[in-house]
Amino acid sequence: MAISATATSSSVPTACARCWTGSSRISAIPMEDLGWICVNSWRFGEIDKPVGGFGSREDLFAGYEEAGRKVDPDRVMFWEVMGTLRWGIMCCGMMQRFRSGPDHSMERAMIGRRSSETEIDLLRLLAPRGSEMQDEPTPTELIKAVADFLRNEITPVIKGHNAFKLRVGINALDLVTRQLALEQRQRCRGSRAAEAVAWHATAR
């Protein structure tokens, strides 16, 4: 069954435009609204339902055309790609805000890391094969953000034996953070040593 004309011609585009522009203004480009709601990040795991995780493109397009609007699937795909790129850039901004801004929360770190998902989404949209994921914030930064959240915001409200177990968990996260940092330093030293050996071998 097609998505109703009432839902597609008013409610859905308005919601999309709010996400896209930060206001209640409906986009002047209807295909932009349709592309935005099809961005994979808004499916929340329901990747087989491209329209917000609850419907299909065919039903959405049929609902729009039932309301008297012509849908151009190619233009919708263009705006889906642009929407994916836009959200990826926004996630990178979150990462920078986490690292250098006033907000060092776990939520900001996790949203920043989601830029890796948009890279994959873009590769799937533009090419059948891709490259490595974007990897920032680093695993060390993510773990530290979780540990800091638990230490600074959860610990004060937990009492009794659960407070003890929480401290043990925080200590475990701190241990993993230190181990990852140590392994990173060792990899860097190993890489420099290998470069030095290679240089001496070629210099002979």
Image (tube, helix red, strand yellow):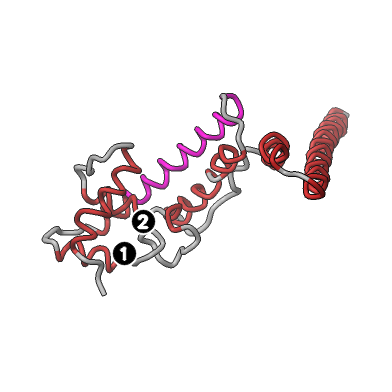
SS at badge 2? loop
Quick check: 175 above or below 195?
below
Residue 82: x and y in percent read 36, 45
Quick check: 121 above or below 157?
below
Q: Which residues are magenta?
A: 79-101
What is the number of the mark on residue 38?
Answer: 2
SS at badge 1? helix
Quarter of the rendering occupied by the N terminus: bottom left
Quick check: 191 above or below 118?
above
Q: Nearer the viewer, residue 37 or 155?
A: 155
In this view, which residue lies farthest toward the front?
160
Amino acid type, label 1: Arg
* Residue lying at 26% horizontally and 40% vertically, measured from the top left: 24
Residue 126: x and y in percent read 42, 53
Horizontal arrangement in the rendering, residue 30 relative to residue 99 (left or right): left
Residue 204: x and y in percent read 88, 29
Discs 1, 2 touching: Cβ within 8 Å? yes
* Dominant SS in magenta: helix
Residue for badge 1:
57
* 88 in magenta: yes
